[in-house]
Amino acid sequence: MAFLLNKTTMFSQFRSSSPKLEDPFLQSTRRRFHVELGPREKALLEEDPALKRFKSHKNSVNRLKRFGDVLTIVVVAGCCYEIYVRAVMREEARKQAADQDYK
């Protein structure tokens, strides 16, 4: 019985050592307040004039991505069609084999 009492006091110590909510940093992270961006972050998000000449590169990358997506869809559709054709042919072969067994 004394062991159980010691065990409960041990758990109460763990509970009392948990972080307090009085810390303003913990409260702000829990509540997820919106924080305005500072001048450095705003400067980092602005467009860089040195990268202007690479703008056309962006269009070709998007076109290449779209082509890759279409190619992926075509390959997956072809695989599905091949699986379907093989399944139908196998089923027809089974039916023909069953018909020959009955004759």
Image: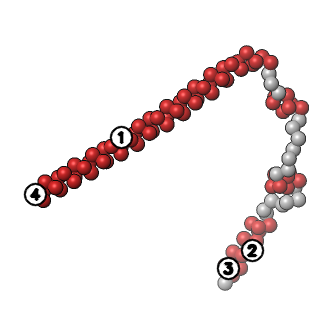
In this picture, is 70 found above or below 84? above
Disc 3: which residue = 4
Disc 4: which residue = 103
Say which element carries label 2: helix
In this picture, is 22 found above or below 75? below
Q: CA distance from mark 2 to mark 3?
A: 9 Å
Q: CA distance from mark 4 to mark 3?
A: 82 Å
| Res 9 label | 2
In this picture, is 93 found above or below 20? above
| Res 82 label | 1
Mark 4 vs 3, N-terminal side: 3
Q: CA distance from mark 1 to mark 3?
A: 68 Å
Mark 2 vs 4, N-terminal side: 2
Q: Residue at x 22, y 53 (%)?
A: 95
Contact between labelled residues 3 and 1, with CB atoms less than 8 Å apart: no
Q: Amino acid at mark 3?
A: Leu
